[in-house]
Image (spheres, rainbow, N blue to C red):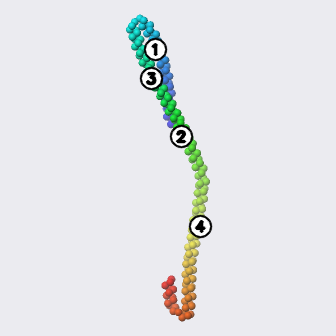
Amino acid sequence: MTSEADNRKEEYESLQLEMEVLEENKCTLEKQVKVLAVELAVERASSNQAGKDKNLLESSFAEQLSKATKEIRGLKHLLNQKEVYAGELVQTLTQAQEDLRMSSDRVQFLENSLTPLQASYDAILTKKEKLRNEIEHWERDYEALEDKTVVEVSWAFLNARHNTLMEASQEGFDLAVEIAKIKETI
């Protein structure tokens, strides 16, 4: 963007120099026209041919002057366009600088926010790991408790059946039948 602006500035300065040269040429041509007009006036008195030459020269110089004036107008128009473009470039650069400043502010804010968020995240990970370990410990305790409960229930059942059998054997029940019932239950 800067090199394009520099190029435009160099073109602008070059056009200004050309305009000054053309203005000087115009002035010179105008002076020449005046000088020639005076010379032609002197010659006109002496000859009709000189009058025709004067008219021809005046026409030629007027044509050159008209062309130079048109070129100057064109250069002025081009110069105005370049000034408008330079203004647009300045505006675009100003906006880009403002956008960059806002982006830098956002990056700074995010960088400042990162440290507390990282600390919070690390604390949550640590807490999560502690909870995971605690859950694993509870699961092991539950499995052990579940195994113990199954064993206690089995022993309680067996003890109850054993007591029933003992009572039954004292009362004359068939022990073999009752043992078969226990085996089926187990």
Labels 1, 4: front one: 1
Q: What's the CA distance linking mark 4 and mark 2?
A: 55 Å
List x then y, in percent, for residue 20: 50, 22
SS label for mark 3: helix
Q: What's the CA distance linking mark 3 and mark 2?
A: 39 Å
Q: Which residue is the site of mark 1? A: 33
Q: Which residue is the site of mark 3? A: 70
List x then y, in percent, for residue 39: 45, 9
Type of amino acid at the residue the image marks with label 4:
Glu
Type of amino acid at the residue the image marks with label 2:
Ala
In the image, what residue occupies the spot 50% across and 33% down?
Answer: 85
List x then y, in percent, for residue 34: 47, 13
Q: What's the CA distance linking mark 4 and mark 3?
A: 93 Å
In the image, what residue occupies the spot 57% across and 47% down?
Answer: 107
* Of pointers 3 and 1, the one earlier in the residue sequence: 1
Q: Quadrant of residue 95?
A: top right
Q: What's the CA distance linking mark 3 and mark 1?
A: 18 Å
| Numbered circle sitting on residue 96 | 2
Above-or-below relation of 185 to 138: below
Q: Residues within 10 Å of mark 3 (few under 14, many from 20)?
A: few
* Of pointers 1 and 2, the one earlier in the residue sequence: 1
Q: Residues within 10 Å of mark 4 (few under 14, many from 20)?
A: few
In the image, what residue occupies the spot 60% across and 59% down?
Answer: 123
Tell me if residue 9 can be seen: no
Q: Which residue is the site of mark 4? A: 134
The answer to the question of whether label 1 and label 4 lie on touching residues, with beta carbons closer than 8 A, is: no
* Of pointers 4 and 2, the one earlier in the residue sequence: 2
Type of amino acid at the residue the image marks with label 3:
Lys
Q: What's the CA distance linking mark 1 and mark 4?
A: 109 Å
* Of pointers 4 and 3, the one earlier in the residue sequence: 3
Tell me if residue 172 can be seen: yes
SS label for mark 2: helix
